[in-house]
Image (tube, helix red, strand yellow):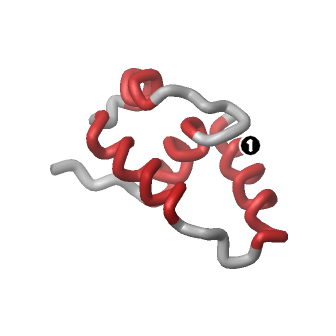
Amino acid sequence: MARYAQSVKDRAVARMLPPENASVEQVSAEMSISLAALGRWRADALAMPPADPASAGEARLEAVLATG
């Protein structure tokens, strides 16, 4: 099983969440990460409430900007 740096996970999850909403299949093809891993990361991200709702948008924006 491959291990990925947190920054890689963050970039992948950011691609799958709004505003991009890229499909798991698309991100898998682009980043060469398994569908199972991406699905798990996405589910984990959606299940966790933001610790500080005011900063959640900023963190997502930073992740999106880092991928561009």
Can you tell which quarter of the image residue 55 is in?
Answer: bottom right
**Residue 11, position as x, y percentages in the image:** 55, 45
The number of callouts visible is 1
Residue at 58%, 37% (x, y): give it: 15
Residue under label 1, please give it.
65
Relative side of 64 to 31, left or right:
right
Can you tell which quarter of the image residue 34 is in?
Answer: top left
**Residue 13, position as x, y percentages in the image:** 52, 46
**Amino acid bearing label 1:** Leu
In this view, the residue in front, 3 or 17, is: 17
Label 1 residue SS: helix
Residue at 43%, 52% (x, y): give it: 43
**Residue 47, position as x, y percentages in the image:** 50, 62
The quadrant the C terminus occupies is top right
In this view, the residue in front, 46 or 11, is: 46
Placement of 18 over or under 8, stated as above or below: above
In this view, the residue in front, 6 or 16, is: 16
Relative side of 23 to 36, left or right:
right
Placement of 12 over or under 24, stated as above or below: below
| Residue found at the far right of this picture | 54
Sort mark 1 into few (<14), some (14-19) or many (20+) by Cα contacts within 10 Å.
few
Relative side of 59 to 9, left or right:
right
| Residue found at the far left of this picture | 1
Residue at 55%, 37% (x, y): give it: 16
Residue at 30%, 45% (x, y): give it: 37
**Residue 44, position as x, y percentages in the image:** 44, 59
